[in-house]
Amino acid sequence: MTKPFPNTMDFSGYNAPSRIECDVYDLVIDGELPGEIEGSWYRTIPDPPFPPLLGHDTYLSGDGMISLFRFENGHVDFKMRYVQTERYKAQHAARRGLFGLYRNPYTDDPSVRGKGRGAANTTPIWHGKRLFALKEDSRAMEVHPDTLETIGEWDYGGRLKSLTMTAHPRPDPETGELYFFGYEADGLASRQVAFCVADRAGNLIREEWFEAPYCALMHDFAVTKEHIIFPVFPTTADLDRIKSGGPHWVFEPDRESYIGIMPRNGSVKEMRWFRHPARMSFHFMNAHTAGDKVHLDFGVSNANVFPFILEASGLTFDPAKLRGGYVRWTFDLSKPDDTIEETMLGPPGDMPRVAEKDHMKDYEIGYYQRFDPTIGPPLLAGPVGGGFNAISRLNVRERTIRTLPMDRRTTVQEHIHIPSKRAGHEGYLAFVADIHDEPYSQVWIVEAGNIEQGVVCKLRMPLRLRVGVHGNWVPAEAF
Ligand code: V55
Ligand code: FE
């Protein structure tokens, strides 16, 4: 008998597990859906089917659910399925949670010893005519792009050596290559990082390993036309701690951050490490190289904001001590030292997105999400606790922002960018809006270039969508 989930923030409100695999044919659309929007929007959602083995868990552990909004001829059809990982299948058969602490196999039920723990719950990505669901502690899971049926683990035809693959690979829009990496590449708490490239057709063409200064939670990285940038912020793992049943990650505020930069067409042996006091970030908006300078744009803070990581670190979340902002870090490769120059771009936030055509180059516009306390108190949504309530369009050249605020009862899930086929049109942003005093979610679509003008159309969902992590848009012509 399956009992109720714990009454904690990871399983309550819009974080309550959905567990619904479904098809909704022809969603109700309120307003005018722009006719040029044709394609597939995939989202991944951690969605635990059973209460946690240990009686508590983080939202980040939930089994991967993948959802599809298929936009075709002015209609939108919806589909949602679990990714059939080894983890999911074992728990489904047992009808209970079998996995213990986040990324700690030593805390699992003995029946799943040695089984894959990957939840495939973080990012869906389309590359080489295949759809993958990614989780950074494992290899990719391949999923059918129309039916969302699981095809199986993807190891690049047996060529990939790394046991892990980041959930934030970086596609080059011009070459069609996929740049990615895997950290803890040869096992738990390892310092080994694999740097990899797949060509346009999806063949693995490079895999080079290097050692990070320490084992860190390397959630994302960045690529320019000339350089690869690896961030090492001090959220760290320790094998003895894991083996004794402790937490995988702790945040160490007294340890330095390291940023490794290597030439894109060079070797990992040419990596140069730059240093900075302890910082944390999960996602990078974009990066580019201009002469001897490499610029990296992202939301930074002085602590890891995940409650389960702070707790494991013996730290308490103190909003008064939290410092952050949207910044540009500049690395001057002509100088011999290892210092980093920081300039402010905007107020703090996360969930950055640029138009894919602007990726890896000097660019003008990025979109990211913020929490604006003047709108209202935080509402429970997502892994950090409070959900974002505003989407901003940042002009990184002018350092100006324009914002679409939500109302005090609404939080936003991650937005995607949908390019327009019309010359001079900036495209659209689409996102799930969680309206906390209504039972069901809605999808809102806005004009990316005029976000402050508000919603162009709404898709009315006949169910509540648990807060997801990342999504991606695949235009119809890409299939
Ligand atoms: C993140 C998300 C994860 C994870 C590690 O957003 C970091 C950051 C959904 O899973 O495992
Ligand atoms: Fe992420």
Image (cartoon, grey):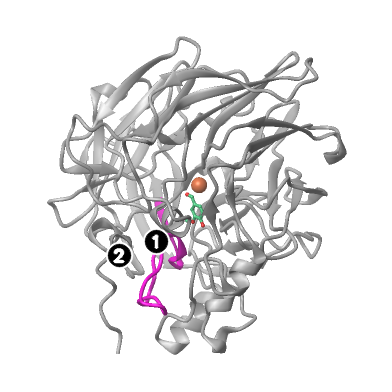
Residue type marked 1: Tyr
Write down the region rendered in magenta: 46-69
Q: Is residue 378 above or below residue 355?
A: below
Residues tagged 1 and 2 counted as in contact (Cβ below 8 A): yes
Q: Which residue is the site of mark 2?
A: 11
Give how far apart the Cα atoms at labels 1 and 2 are.
7 Å
Q: Is residue 146 above or below residue 326?
A: below
Q: Which residue is the site of mark 1?
A: 59
Quarter location, residue 169: top right
Quarter location, residue 170: top right
Toward the viewer: 61 or 358?
Answer: 61
Q: Is residue 127 above or below residue 161?
A: above
Does the magenta run of residues contain 314? Answer: no
> Going by the image, does 197 lie left or right of 309?
right
Tell me the tag on residue 477.
none
Toward the viewer: 315 or 391?
Answer: 315
Q: Residues within 10 Å of mark 1 (few under 14, many from 20)?
A: many
Determine if the C-beta at disc 1 is less than 8 A from ligand 1. yes
- The disc, 1 or 2, on the residue closer to the chain's N-terminal end is 2
